[in-house]
Amino acid sequence: MRVTINELKEMKQHGEKIPMLTAYDYVTAKLVDEAGIPLILVGDSLGMVILGYESTIPVTMVEMLHHTKAVVKGTKRALVVGDMPFMTYHASVADALRNAARFIQQGGAQAVKLEGGERMAEIVKRIVECGIPVMGHIGLTPQSAYQLGGFKVQGKTPEAASQLLNDARALEQAGAFAIVLELVPAPLAKIITQRISVPTIGIGAGPFCDGQVQVISDLLGLYTEFVPKHAKQYAKLADIIRAAVADYLTEVRGGSFPTKRESYTMDESLLEGLIDEAS
Ligand code: KIV
């Protein structure tokens, strides 16, 4: 049985922290699930860390569904959230409902995430009314980075802080089951967390949120082109991969790989005819 949105709400009520990670493929999702992470996001960050795009803007529904299916296959216990890509929920309610449904029906996810606060509340409400759990995302919303003037910490003026609180309340009212706070000053994230009943999941939002989310490629030290201040590398997989590939290269070039151990044998007398042919 997978983790439910009610269990996540109970975790907040009991003061139990909620660890969340992104995953984009079967193998990684399986490891993350087996480690006991209750909430997995197939983030549109895959545009950068998997597909090599410069931002999340070019990511499509087809790409998201492809990766969501793999993550769902790799997991048994975690609740899997599919991240709705840029412009798949803005143009009309009908678009938003259709695309949210695709994550559940075709991708196998148990919930969707979308960016935006008050201005997205009606869309969130309509998706929730269809029976699809929605996770909100406010603060720095990467799909609006051009509008926000880049990847900056949000809510730093009294007006902006108050707007973020309103955004969180609007999403709570609309029925969101949790809200990601990205790049929000820790004291403000604390106030928002105290004022709403649904769990806040922070990324670059300090220690007072109900949960934390990290991009797995940052956590594993796999994506090294840009390491944000709020990311902590729990491993340095890029170094391990570089060293392993360099060793392989040297051994293939030098003829020391493969050895007998990595080779298959057969009764060589059966090859006599071929050996005669060759000589
Ligand atoms: O796409 C993503 O990985 C995200 C997280 C940073 C919350 O939205």
Image (cartoon, rainbow, N blue to C red):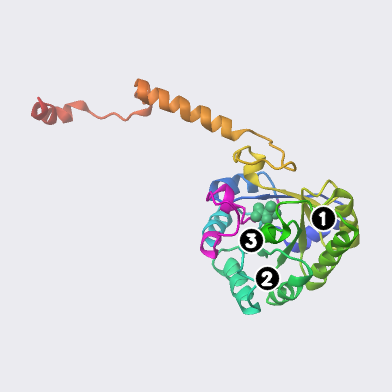
Where residue 83 appears, x then y in whole percent? Answer: 64, 61
> Mark 2 or mark 3: which comes first in sequence?
3
Q: Amino acid at mark 1?
A: Met
Identified at 85% across, 60% down, the residue is 160
Which label sits on residue 83?
Answer: 3
| Residue 148, placed above or below residue 249 | below
Please tell me which residue lies in front, 84 or 18: 84
Identified at 61% across, 50% down, the residue is 23
On whether ligand 1 comes within 8 Å of the CB at mark 3, the answer is: yes
Q: Secondary structure at mark 2?
A: loop
| Residue 29, placed above or below residue 66 | above
Whether residue 275 is visible here, answered yes or no, is yes
Where residue 228 appears, x then y in whole percent? Answer: 70, 43
Where residue 218 appears, x then y in whole percent? Answer: 65, 42
Work out how far the residue at label 1 is from the one at label 3, CA to CA, in angstroms: 22 Å
> Mark 1 or mark 2: which comes first in sequence?
1
As drawn, is 33 to the left or to the right of 177? left
| Residue 102, placed above or below residue 184 | below
Q: Quadrant of residue 41?
A: bottom right
Work out how far the residue at label 2 is from the one at label 3, CA to CA, in angstroms: 13 Å
Q: Secondary structure at mark 1?
A: helix
Where residue 80 appears, x then y in whole percent? Answer: 64, 58
Please tell me which residue lies in front, 264 or 51: 51
Residue bearing the label numbered 2: 132
Which contiguous range is marked in magenta? Answer: 38-64
Residue bearing the label numbered 1: 11
The N terminus lies in quadrant: bottom right
Split into quadrants, the picture shows ligand 1 in the one at bottom right
